[in-house]
């Protein structure tokens, strides 16, 4: 049985649809109930819903053989897992944004508000820019407006929230999308099952193209 960690929410539903199409269905997952674990012995899969930011932990620790996590999580937390496939879902970008008309003054430390402290630190380290990271957990957009930070580093999808708060993207750090990841030991001991699933997912993606 292949244990699969799916991210709760809309992304997870899209991911499950891909798995179903690839020949790994589990009809009970569509029932209206509060169950978190679903299995289909015939298809050889057991799915379970977890918080998106926790998927990589379940996979890294071996509670799941494979899972689907955003590239942002993989870059921020650097879990010890294998990245097997870009699913081209949940596409967005990690970006630097600031108040409209912002100009960076290199003579002083740049104040950066973000949920993604490691991504921000690595980005500015590569530029040799001295920064002060302000780690926040929500409503990052408010930070520059209230003068808490000069810029923010955050995920941007449409950019609507930024515009509504008179902010604009000044730099894209990296594109983000959902990735299929595997536990390292599982890839060794369940390599045939995992490779078969990866191959079928790729076939489905090629058909969609």
Image (cartoon, rainbow, N blue to C red):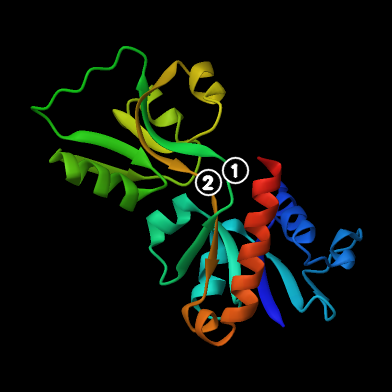
6 horizontally vs 28: left or right: left
Q: Which mark is residue 177?
A: 2
Residue drawn at point x = 40 percent, y = 61 percent: 77
Q: Residue furthest left?
A: 107
**Looking at the figure, which quarter contains the C terminus?**
top right
Check the image and report above or below for 101 versus 209. above
Residue position for label 1:
90
Q: Residue furthest bottom?
A: 189
The picture places residue 150, in percent across and down from the top left corner, at: 29, 28
The picture places residue 21, in percent across and down from the top left corner, at: 78, 56
Q: Are marks 1 and 2 in contact (CB under 8 Å)?
A: yes
SS category of the residue bearing label 2: loop
The earlier-in-sequence mark between 1 and 2 is 1
32 horizontally vs 160: left or right: right
Towards the viewer: 1 or 95: 1
Work out whether residue 11 can be spotted: no
Work out whether residue 150 can be spotted: yes
SS category of the residue bearing label 1: loop
């Amino acid at each position: 049985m292949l244990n699969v960690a799916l991210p709760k929410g809309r992304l997870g539903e899209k991911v499950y649809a891909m798995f179903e199409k690839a020949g790994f269905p589990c009809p009970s997952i569509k029932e209206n109930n509060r169950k978190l674990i679903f299995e289909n012995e015939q298809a050889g899969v057991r799915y379970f819903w977890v918080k998106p930011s926790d998927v990589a932990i379940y996979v890294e620790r071996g509670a799941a053989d494979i899972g689907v996590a955003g590239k942002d999580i993989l870059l921020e937390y650097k879990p010890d897992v294998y990245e097997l496939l870009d699913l081209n879902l949940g596409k967005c970008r990690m970006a630097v944004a600031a108040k409209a008309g912002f100009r960076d003054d290199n003579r002083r430390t740049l104040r950066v508000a973000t949920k993604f402290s490691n991504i921000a630190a690595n980005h500015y380290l590569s530029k040799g820019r001295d920064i002060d990271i302000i780690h926040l957990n929500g409503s990052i957009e408010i930070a520059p407006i209230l003068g808490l930070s000069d810029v923010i580093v955050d995920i941007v999808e449409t950019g609507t929230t930024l515009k509504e708060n008179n902010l604009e993207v000044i730099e894209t750090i990296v594109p983000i999308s959902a990735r299929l990841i595997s536990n390292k030991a599982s890839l060794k001991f369940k390599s045939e099952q995992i490779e078969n699933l990866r191959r079928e997912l790729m076939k489905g993606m090629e058909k969609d193209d």
